[in-house]
Image (cartoon, rainbow, N blue to C red):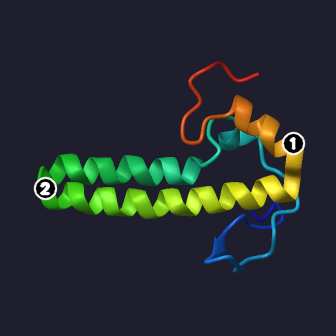
Amino acid sequence: MKRVGKGNPFDAMGHEVAPRTKHLMTDGPYRLSRNPMLSGTYLYYIGVVVACWSWWALLVFAAVAGLMMLQVRSEEKRLEADFGEDYLEYKKRTGRFITFHAAR
């Protein structure tokens, strides 16, 4: 993100915590997922739930997933404001976590 995007879409409670992304990233892993790092994090937590096989692990996963979704929605608003139609087109062709159609 730092090399290609020249910034980060992350905001904390509406406050910029890193330089704003200057270039929309749509190549590499971002071709298949708008949030490839978060997709990996979800996969990790699902593995923890399966390994622990407990309600507590499931509750922690649900809480973490809920918080991360709030962050994703915040980032999407920022990216839409910064990149407009380019980001909307990217959203249409790329899944939030996984793209189920062939990459174009």
Above or below residue 48? Residue 10 is below
Q: Amino acid at mark 1?
A: Asp
Q: Residue at x 72, y 32 (%)?
A: 92
Q: Earlier in the sequence, mark 2 or mark 1?
A: 2
Q: Quadrant of the N terminus?
A: bottom right
Quarter holding residue 2? bottom right
Question: Based on the displayed image, in which of its 4 quarters is residue 45 positioned?
Answer: bottom left
The quadrant in which residue 30 appears is top right
Name the secondary structure under disc 1: helix
Determine whether 63 is above or below 27 in the image: below
Left or right side of 50 for 13:
right
- Give the residue at x 37% y 63%: 64
How far apart, in angstroms, are the residues tagged by discs 2 and 1? 42 Å
**Secondary structure under badge 2?**
helix
The image shows residue 93 at horizontal and vertical percentages of 72, 29
Which x, y percent locates residue 47? 28, 48
x and y, in percent, of residue 35 in the image: 60, 49
Quarter of the rendering occupied by the C terminus = top right
Q: Please state if 70 lies on the left or on the right of 28 as rendered.
A: left
- What amino acid is at disc 2? Trp
On the picture, is 34 further left or further right than 43? right
Q: Residue tagged by mark 1?
A: 86
Residue at left offset 65%, top offset 44%: 34
Closer to the camera, 50 or 3?
Answer: 50
Q: Can you see residue 4?
A: no
Q: Which is nearer the eye, 68 or 28? A: 68
Mark 1, residues whose alpha carbon is within 10 Å: few (<14), some, or many (≥20)?
few
The residue at which mark 2 appears reads as 55
Q: Point out the residue furthest to the top here.
A: 102
Q: Is residue 7 visible?
A: yes
Compared with residue 6, is residue 85 higher up or lower down, i.e. above or below?
above
Count residues near mark 2 (Cα–Cα under 10 Å), then give few for <14, some for 14-19, many for 20+: few
